[in-house]
Image: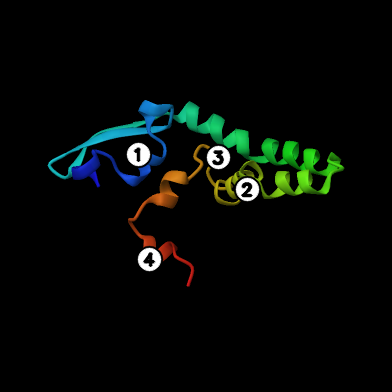
Amino acid sequence: MWEEEATAPCLSTCAIDHEGCLGGSLADGRIAERQYDRERCTTRVYTYWIPGFQKSLEAALNEEDKERRKMILYGSFFTRTLWSMTYSAQNQAQCYECVRVCPVGLPYRTKK
């Protein structure tokens, strides 16, 4: 992927040049430079983490229309909130989206 697109799965999902958290480059098949914007990543985690869960759960509980309530509970924001609480519980400074798309070790992370 690097040779064809000058990126990797982790970098493409959260590119620092496109307001993401990760950046870097390879030279001769090795990491030559790496960037990680911790502040930006942390704000994203906390947007979806427990405060985001509380806000969207309150909105769902207060919504009288059944279809709108379903949209809140099954929508991407609530899903990302639950995902971030589950997978970011041990390290609150990273959302782990880059790890999720990483092909390294995939067989060990795949549910059997």
91 vs 10, left or right, is: right
Q: Nearer the viewer, mark 2 or mark 3?
A: 2
Which residue shows up at 49% across the image and 68% down it? Answer: 111
Pointer 2 with pointer 3, Cβ within 8 A:
no
Name the residue carrying label 3: 92
Q: Which residue is mark 4?
A: 107
Which of labels 4 and 2 is toward the front? 2
The first of marks 1 and 4 along the sequence is 1
Real-space Cα distance between discs 4 and 2?
24 Å
For disc 1, the marked residue is 11
Residue 89, given in percent of the width and then of the height, sits at 59, 47
The amino acid at mark 1 is: Leu
Q: Which mark is residue 77?
A: none
The Cα atoms of the two marked residues, 2 and 1, are separated by 22 Å
Label 4 amino acid? Pro
Q: Residue at x 38, y 61 (%)?
A: 106
Please name the residue that numbered disc 2 is placed on.
79
Of the numbered discs 1 and 3, the one sitting upstream in the chain is 1
> Callout 2, which amino acid?
Thr
Q: Whole-Å distance between the Cαs marked 3 and 4?
A: 25 Å
Which tag is nearer the camera, tag 3 or tag 4?
4
Q: Position of residue 64 (x, y in %)?
A: 87, 42
Q: Amino acid at mark 3?
A: Gln
Going from N to C along the chain, the mark reached first, 3 or 4, is 3
- Whether residues under marks 1 and 4 lie with C-beta atoms below 8 angstroms apart, the answer is no
